[in-house]
């Protein structure tokens, strides 16, 4: 669970224009599929909370958000 701006989030979802998005942060590789949420946590198949905070701020070249926290 990630807490940003006094709200708690359980998943992060890719909403970009491509069908998938792969990124590497801190030695871990995350593979996102379009509109499919991934859990946030410290377990093996989840996204680390610190990484989720960083990824949630990313924008495409037009300035639109690529990810949504839910």
Image (cartoon, grey):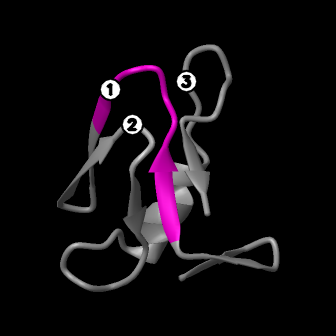
> How far across and how far down the image is residue 12, in percent?
49, 59
Q: Nearer the viewer, residue 28 or 36?
A: 36
Q: Residue furthest front?
A: 35
**Which residue is rendered at x = 52% and y = 36% of the image?**
15
Q: Is there a contact, CB below 8 Å, between mark 1 and mark 2?
A: yes
Location of mark 1 (residue): 19
Quarter of the figure with residue 66: top right
- What is the span of residues highlighted in magenta in the rendered image? 11-21
Location of mark 2 (residue): 34
Quarter of the image with the C terminus is bottom right
Q: Is there a contact, CB below 8 Å, between mark 1 and mark 3?
A: no
Task: Confirm whether the magenta stretch covers residue 43.
Answer: no
Quarter of the figure with residue 63: top right
Q: Is residue 52 above or below residue 46?
A: above
> How far across and how far down the image is residue 46, in percent?
30, 73
Q: Residues within 10 Å of mark 1 (few under 14, many from 20)?
A: few
Location of mark 3 (residue): 60
Q: Secondary structure at mark 1?
A: loop
- Of labels 1 and 3, earlier in sequence is 1
């Amino acid at each position: 669970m990630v807490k940003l701006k006094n709200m708690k989030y359980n998943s992060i979802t890719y909403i970009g224009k491509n069908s998938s998005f792969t990124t590497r942060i801190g030695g871990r590789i995350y593979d996102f599929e379009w509109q499919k949420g991934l859990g946030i946590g410290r377990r093996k198949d989840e996204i680390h909370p610190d990484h989720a905070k960083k990824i949630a701020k990313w924008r495409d070249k037009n300035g639109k958000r690529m990810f949504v926290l839910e």
